[in-house]
Image (spheres, grey):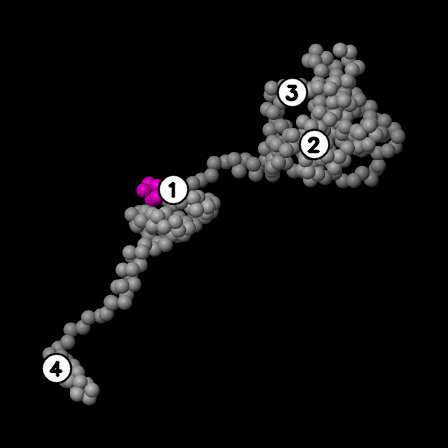
């Protein structure tokens, strides 16, 4: 095949997705969508050897790329910013988009280096041509930068192992708490880590003894209760004790006699 022929196929190396830029990009929110958009842009640029410009005249807008790739416009706009930040594309002032790594994926390995050098010369030549024509505005619109580092840090934090709120509980209590968690899932009221921590705090307030804590958890599990409550038996005993807890008094013989007289007088009046 002659060197001047255009390539209509693309070869990806087996370590394509192991590239640092690809890992960073796919680690971002919607990163896998960005990856799909990038591959489709590579394919769309094959006929023009990596230069995206409709009929060599009309720049590809985010709306056009969204139509070609089948993604939402907002997703495409974010993806283009990420591509530029990672050095995967270069957008010239006339709107032409160059897929910077496309020469790694087309043709044969024997002529890859020459083709990459030629591609770089082509980009440089177009830049120079634009400058010579005076079409680069001195009042260039400020570039909108995307800060990838915070997103990467968020991703690292999300992937970091979370501390189990129940880890410090007594083994028996922890097992009962696991049953309580599973019950919450079954009734479609699964708990977040924050909710688990709050439930454990309430459990400790209701009882300090591990055996009572297990009983409280089992009570809610068996009754499919979302919350944790005081044991029914203890509550009943507390109420009964409060209602009948009259103070006893010892009376003298004189007081007994006086009380008897009062009762007799009261009976006569009736």
Q: Between marks 1 and 4, how big is the CA–CA gap? A: 65 Å
Instruction: Identify the element where label 3 is drawn.
Output: loop
Residue 13 drawn above or below residue 226: above
Mark with earlier residue (2, 1): 2
Quadrant where the N terminus sits is top right
The structure residue drawn at horizontal position 78% and vertical position 40%, both measured from the top left corner, is 141
Residue at image mark 2: 69
Q: Between marks 3 and 4, how big is the CA–CA gap? A: 111 Å
Instruction: Identify the element where label 4 is drawn.
Output: helix
Residue 149: quadrant of the picture: top right
Instruction: Identify the element where label 2 is drawn.
Output: helix
Q: Is residue 158 left or right of residue 223?
A: right
The structure residue drawn at horizontal position 67% and vertical position 31%, both measured from the top left corner, is 37
Foreground: disc 2 or disc 1:
2
Residue at image mark 4: 257
Residue at image mark 3: 12
Looking at the rendering, the stretch of residues picked out in magenta corresponds to 170-176
Foreground: disc 2 or disc 3:
2
Foreground: disc 4 or disc 2:
2
Q: Are marks 3 and 4 in contact (CB under 8 Å)?
A: no
Q: Are marks 3 and 1 in contact (CB under 8 Å)?
A: no
The structure residue drawn at horizontal position 77% and vertical position 13%, both measured from the top left corner, is 3
Looking at this view, name the residue that lies furthest to the left: 253
């Amino acid at each position: 095949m002659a060197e001047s022929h255009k390539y209509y196929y693309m070869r990806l190396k087996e370590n394509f997705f192991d590239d640092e830029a690809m890992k960073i990009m796919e680690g971002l929110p919607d990163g896998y969508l960005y990856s799909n958009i990038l591959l489709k842009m590579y394919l769309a640029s094959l006929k023009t050897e990596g230069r995206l410009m409709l009929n060599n005249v009309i720049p590809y807008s985010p709306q056009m790329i969204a139509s070609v790739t089948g993604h939402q416009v907002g997703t495409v706009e974010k993806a283009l910013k990420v591509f530029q930040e990672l050095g995967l594309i270069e957008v010239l002032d006339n709107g032409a988009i160059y897929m910077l790594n496309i020469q790694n994926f087309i043709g044969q390995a024997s002529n890859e280096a020459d083709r990459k050098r030629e591609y770089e010369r082509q980009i440089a030549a177009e830049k120079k041509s634009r400058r010579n024509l005076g079409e680069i505005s001195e009042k260039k619109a400020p570039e909108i930068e995307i800060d990838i580092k915070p997103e990467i840090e968020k991703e690292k934090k999300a992937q970091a192992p979370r501390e189990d709120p129940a880890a410090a509980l007594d083994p028996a209590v922890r097992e009962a708490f696991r049953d309580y968690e599973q019950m919450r899932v079954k009734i479609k009221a699964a708990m977040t880590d924050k909710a688990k921590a709050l439930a454990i705090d309430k459990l400790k307030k209701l009882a300090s003894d591990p055996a009572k804590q297990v009983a409280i958890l089992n009570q809610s599990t068996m009754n499919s209760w979302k919350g944790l409550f005081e044991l029914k038996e203890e509550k009943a005993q507390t109420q009964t004790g409060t209602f009948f807890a009259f103070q006893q008094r010892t009376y003298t013989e004189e007081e007994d006699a006086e009380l008897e007289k009062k009762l007799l007088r009261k009976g006569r009046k009736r």
